Every structure is written in structure tokens, then in C-alpha cells.
Image (cartoon, rainbow, N blue to C red):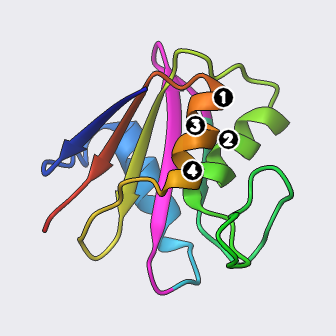
Amino acid sequence: MELIETYDVEEDDPTWALAITESSKSPLRFKLGAAIIKRGKLLGFGYNSYKTHPKFGSKDGFKTLHAEGAALYSAKKLGNNVEGATMIIYRRGARNSKPCEDCQIMIEEAGISKVIYTNYE
């Protein structure tokens, strides 16, 4: 899996726009949104929340569902294969949105080939 840090958010791009919109739905202090695309098709999307899931939820002791897990779960519910896809992660209010170790493992296991995340630090 290739991790790509970006300082430029393409707000006119529909995928970035969705990740930005999803981040605004988060009730948590750190508001993140994620979207998964492959060949121009949206496969899944989500935001971080207090919900949890045995497979897609946080494994770090916090009872939250990270945006990455929510997007992967959304894709699974929609019946979409994410292998070879790209995940976009946006963090509202700046700072780094690099996936945590647990999410990186989950993303790799799902077969996502590229993750583009924001960092304004």
C-alpha cells in the first residue's frame, strides 16, 4: 500500500468533496472523512464516530469507528470490491490525517493500493 501525504485538497473533485462532507458529520473532536474510489467509481465512504464494529472498529481501546473503517464497511455493505482502489482521507480543521497502525493494517488487508491523506502541519 502506498501512502501519499498531500497539502493540496482538490475541493472541486467529487471524491475530495465527499470526504470533506463526510468529515463534517463526525461528532468527535477530530473530524475525519474518507472515500474509496476505483476507476472513477465511488466504492465506499464514511466518517469517524462513536459507533464501533468488531472488524472495522478501532482496536486501540477507544470505542470509535475510524473514517477508514467506516468507508471500508460501507463498501462491503454495498458489495463493492476495494482491491486495487484508492482511499482519500480528509481531516477537518487541518493537521495530519495519516491512518493509525490499526487502520493501515485493515486497509492493506482489504487490498487498497493507495491512500492519499491530508497534512497541513
In the rendered structure, which amino acid carries the disc numbered 4?
Answer: Cys
Residues at circles 2 and 4 in contact by the CB criterion of under 8 Å? no
**Residue highlighted by disc 4:** 103
Crowding near the residue tagged with mark 2, few <14, some 14–19, many ≥20 C-alpha atoms within 10 Å: many
Query: Image check: 10 left or right of 106?
Result: left
What is the spatial separation of the Cα atoms under label 2 and label 1, in whole angstroms?
8 Å
- The quarter holding residue 15 reads top left
**First in sequence: mark 2 vs mark 3:** 2
**First in sequence: mark 2 vs mark 4:** 2
Query: Image check: 71 left or right of 7?
Result: right
Residues at circles 2 and 3 in contact by the CB criterion of under 8 Å? yes
Crowding near the residue tagged with mark 1, few <14, some 14–19, many ≥20 C-alpha atoms within 10 Å: some
- 41 up-or-down from 10: above or below: above
Which quadrant: the C terminus?
Answer: bottom left
**First in sequence: mark 4 vs mark 1:** 4
Q: Residue at x 61, y 17 (%)?
A: 83
**Front residue (pair 106, 119):** 106
In the rendered structure, which amino acid carries the disc numbered 2?
Answer: Leu
In the rendered structure, which amino acid carries the disc numbered 1?
Answer: Ala
Nearest to viewer (mark 2 / mark 1): 1
Residues at circles 4 and 3 in contact by the CB criterion of under 8 Å? yes
**Residue highlighted by disc 2:** 72
**Residue highlighted by disc 3:** 107
Nearest to viewer (mark 2 / mark 4): 4
Q: Secondary structure at mark 4?
A: helix
